Structure formats: structure tokens, C-alpha cells
Image (spheres, grey):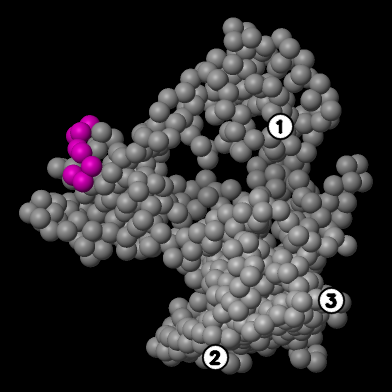
Amino acid sequence: MVNIFRSTGRSKTRWGIAVLVLLGLLAAGMVFPVQTNRGLTALRLRTVREYPFRLGLDLQGGTQLIYDADVSRVPSGEQSAALAGVRDVIERRVNAFGVAEPIVQTARAGDSWRVIVELAGITDIQGAINLIGETPLLEFKEESTDKPRELTAEEKKLLVQFNDKQKALATDILNRVKRGEEFAALARQYSEDPAAVKEKGGDIGFVQAGETGLGAAMLREVLSSKVKPGELVSSIVEDASGYSLVKLESTRADTKEVRTRHLLICFVDAISCNKPISKEDARKKIEELKAKATAENFETLVKENSTEPGADKSGGDLGYFSRGQMVQAFEEVAFAQSVGTISEPVESPFGFHLIHKLDERALTEYHLARIFFKKKQPTDIVPPAEPWKYTGLTGKQLKRAAVEFDPNTNEPIVSLEFNSEGGKLFEEITRRNVGKNVAIFLDRQPISVPRVNEAISGGRAVITGRFDVKEAKLLAQRLNAGALPVPIKLEARQLIGASLGKESLDRSLLAGKIGFAIIVLFMLLYYRLPGLLASIALSLYVLLVLAIFKLWPVTLTLSGIAGVILSIGMAVDANILIFERLKEELRAGRPLDSAIVEGFRRAWTSIRDSNISSLITALILITFTSSAVRGFALTLAIGILVSMFSAITVTRTLLRFVAPWIKARVWLFGVVSANPKS
């Protein structure tokens, strides 16, 4: 095992400090995005994405539903898989109705199974019950040829009246902005944009010329009206979706875009490759083409050799693109090479490329804000025709789905077996849809859309595709979840108010702040300089843990916050062990550098053993418990892992950094005197 306590050079220590500072800044930017973006905007830099904390039911408020699952008709070996399928169905069903991140867990007590559903932010218990339902719905549908009906004269009249009213409102707000009222405040009050845009005063971020999507029409109007940063477009911007009042906040021209032509040779297992070319043969082919390629013949080589669909017509021309629009390997080479040059072969997930750089130009980005008033569309009155129609074949007629392997290709496939009624229906459906698609829906969401090659009789069918084993098992599980008789019955319901959650959260945060302050004060008074360094390491620890919670994301519950606070104490405990060992070495007369190394070496085994035992306990709780206990164990485990990094790496790096300036000042370590080591 490598000795993690060996001394390092001064240069390595400085690099360590630089890495820690960078890590701290990144974590702080993640934890405090509003303040960070304010500073970045002032410096005219690109803002960072804001990740919210994910609050659990007990903090945000919401609904908890507990169901009993009847698995009496399911073979014992299939019960766990059946419940996993039911959990998956409920999660997707809730997500489809706009409830983000539901917590759905299954638990077993003896021979009984329970499904626990937690919907943070949902206070309508009956609505939640109706949302979840009690039976997963599996359907087979065929392509529909139905067309939507035309609007009646009265419906057309109402449509025009509504849109005229929206335009009049937009005109009124435009005049109010021109008279001096604050644009952002009016956006927050009146805009019909999504909440994420509306709450930021209508800020939609930076838009590039030629872009499609939300800001395209607005940017065209900004450019044609020649407004300056901070100014408002003087007229209403209208498009198919509605009416917008547009403001140009700022511009920046510190990025660029390039135009390239590329030649692609794909190989087996590359994305979207349907050519039977081995990777080695593809490599040889691209190298041969590179030897032949010139700026003059490149387009001809592309049309004759590229495996990209449509390259024989486009010549591989990708047009202009900016950073973030291509895969990383391709993008790095395209931006680095000079205009007019042809790259060496570049490997990406799509295959091997030769890149001919045609042009490069500065890219101006425009920071826009808007107040939006939505138009009513004909489809809001008469919904568009459904692309799929009901066939009568559902999960009731499916006996089972299983994973098998194609005897010719050895690829995983999913086999379906219907009962007698389902077999007849399936034969009729496939006979009338030869050459067309038949979709398999689970809870009104398509999970597979196979093409019918011929009428299928006998009540059996297979679903083929580029599955891996995991994907095939998941598909079979979902199909069986719709077919297996696993009825769920509501046994308990509970509404948790948001006011209680807010009060609990505020008290928990206050307790955490007080505890943190007391720990820092104790460390400063008792350990002096090491205590100060430990407090800095502890601050970095808190930032890293919170950043991890946002990125994962971890659902924070009251018990989870308790796990975080407990892990802070464990992080301090590791520092105390190290500093006591360090003081012993200093009292024995060791030089400071040697005492630091020895102090960490002697404390490591105790820190390692105590944290590993705590991690084992946390993993047991994560594996065999649910809900609040699992949340506590998860946050505790994350905290323990980060605390070990904080105590061993961060504190040690800080001590080594300050050591050269304080070698003779052992009193800074709380040591009154030192006895020379004999």
C-alpha cells in the first residue's frame, strides 16, 4: 500500500493549496448560485447553472400514501421483480403529471409487501390517489389515420377574441415599461413564461444569432431594430406562440464558431452505425483517406466514402457551430486546427472522422429578457388527433414476458406470450399492420415501438432491438408489471403541512449554525493555529457536502440534515485525533515537519477504523431500511467520506503550507514547551 503520509515538496504543497482553493470556489458557486451569478454578470462572464436543493416530504410538505400489495397470486421468486415493476410504473405515472422527483419505495414485512409513495409539494390527497390509481395499464396500439375536426365559426371567433385581449394587455404593459416602470418587476407579475424564467425577471439568458428555439424570433427583432444594451424593443414581438416584450440586457463577443466539413467512417458498436466494419478496418480506411485528402478533393472523398447518412449529397458540410454543440473529441480538434487544414483521424462515439476546417468567425451572444403573453392555438380548443389508437389488446391478455437470446446474433430479445384471447387479437392486429408499427404502451407512455414484418399467429411474439441485457430485463419487468395480478390497496394516507416543514428546516439550520460556531470557537481556543486550519477545512467540507447534495441530487429530509450535522462532528473528531498526536510529537521534541508526518501517521489507523465501522452501519441502514432512516444513513455516509478527505487531505495540506513560517513557534499548537528528542 502506498504511504499516504510521506513528505512532499514545497511545490507540490502549493499546487495542493491551489486545487483546494479552486475546489472551494466551485463548491461555493454551486451552493450559492444567485450570489455567484450576480458577480459573474458584473464581470461580464457566463453565468452558472442553478441547481436547487431537493427537499423531502417533511420539509417541503406534501402527501404520503401507503399501499398494501397483494402478491398472493405471484410466485415467490417473482414477487420482488413484480413490486419493482409496480414502483417503476408509479414513478413514471406521477412524473407524467408534472410531479417532479416522487419518492416511491417498497418494503417487506414477513409475507406482506408495501408500497410507500411520498409526493413532496402535493397537498391534494384525493388528487394524488386518483393520480396513482391502483392498476398499471399495459396497452398495444396501432397507428391512427384519424384527423382532427375543423374549428366551428363560434370557436374561431372566441380564439380571435382571446388573442386580441392578450395583445391589448401586452400593449398596455409595453407602455408602462416605456413610462419608467421596472421591466423585471412587471415580468414577475404578468409574464406567462415558465416559473424559472418568470421568477428571474424574464431573464432567458444568452442567445446566439442563427439559433432556433425560445430566443430566435426575439433576437431577430433586436437585431433589426438595432437596440443597445439596456434598451427595450419599441414594439411587440409576435410569433406563433404569443406576444413578447423584449429587452436587450447586454452583449458579449468572447466566443467563436467554426464551419467544418467532415468524413466519417463508422464501425460496429459506434452510435447509429449500420455498417459491418470492424474498428481496426475503419481505422485503416480513415488513414488511407487521410493520405489522399486535400482541400480540393475533400468534398469528393466525403461523397464517395463517408458512412454518414446523406453525406453523398451534403458533402459532410456541418455548417457553423459553437462550443457545446458537437461531441467533445470532435469539437476540441475542430476549434484547435487552422482554417483550411485537414485533421488527423479523430475518434468519437460515432466512428473515425477527418475534419476539414472551412472557416472561423467571432460569435456575438445577446443577453435577453422578456415579458410573455401566450396565444391560444386551435389545438387548445380541438386537440390534435392521437397518433396511436386503441386495439383492445392490453396487459390482461399477456401471460408473461421474458428475456431470451437470438440464436443467430446472440443479442437479447424480449419474448411475449399471450393467452388465447390475446393471441387471436394479436394475430388480427399484426395482419392489418404489416409494414407498419405497433406500439406497446405502459401507463400511456410508449416503451417499445416494433415494426410488424408479417402476421403473427400462435400467441407468441418477440420484441427485437439494440438491447443490452439490462435494458431487455427492464423492458420485460415493465411488461410483467402491467400483466401480473399485483393489486395495490390504499391502507394509510397522511398530509404534511408546509408550515411544519419550514419550521423544522429553520430550526435544523439554526442548530447547525450554532453547532458549527461552537466547534470553530473550541478549536481556535484549544488548538490555536491547527484549530484555525481545521475550521477552514471544515468550511470546505460543508461546501463540498452541500454541492454533492445538489448534484446527486440527494433528497434532504429532517433526518438527513441530522446525518449531516452528525458527520460534521465526526469530521472534527478526526482533526482532534490528529492534533493530539501532533502535540505529543512536539512535546517529545520532534521538528515540526516530522511531527506533522508522524501525527497523521499515528492518527490514521484510528480514523480509518472508526469511519469504516460507521460506513458499514450506514450501508446496512441504506440497504435494509426505508424513508427517514435511509435518508439519515445516506447523508451520513456521504458526510463520512467527505470528512475523511477533509481531515486527512485538506488539513494536512494546510499544515504543510504554513509549517515553514512557524517552525519555532510551538506555542501556536497549544504546546507550552518541548523536550528535545534524545
Q: Name the amino acid, label 1.
A: Glu
Q: Real-space Cα distance between discs 3 and 2?
A: 72 Å
Reading the chain from its start, which is encountered first: label 1 or label 2? 1
Residue 274 x %, y %: 74, 32
Question: Residue visible at 49% across and 31% down?
Answer: 321
Residue 149 x %, y %: 38, 50
Q: Which residues lie in the magenta part?
A: 224-231
- The residue beneath circle 1 is 347
Residue 193 x %, y %: 32, 57
Q: Residue furthest right?
A: 407
- The residue beneath circle 3 is 678
Indicate whether residue 226 is drawn in magenta.
yes
Question: Residue visible at 55% across and 20% down?
Answer: 338
Q: Residue furthest top?
A: 296
Query: Can you say whether 572 is above or below 403 in the image?
Result: below
Query: Quarter-wise, where is residue 254 in the image?
Result: top left
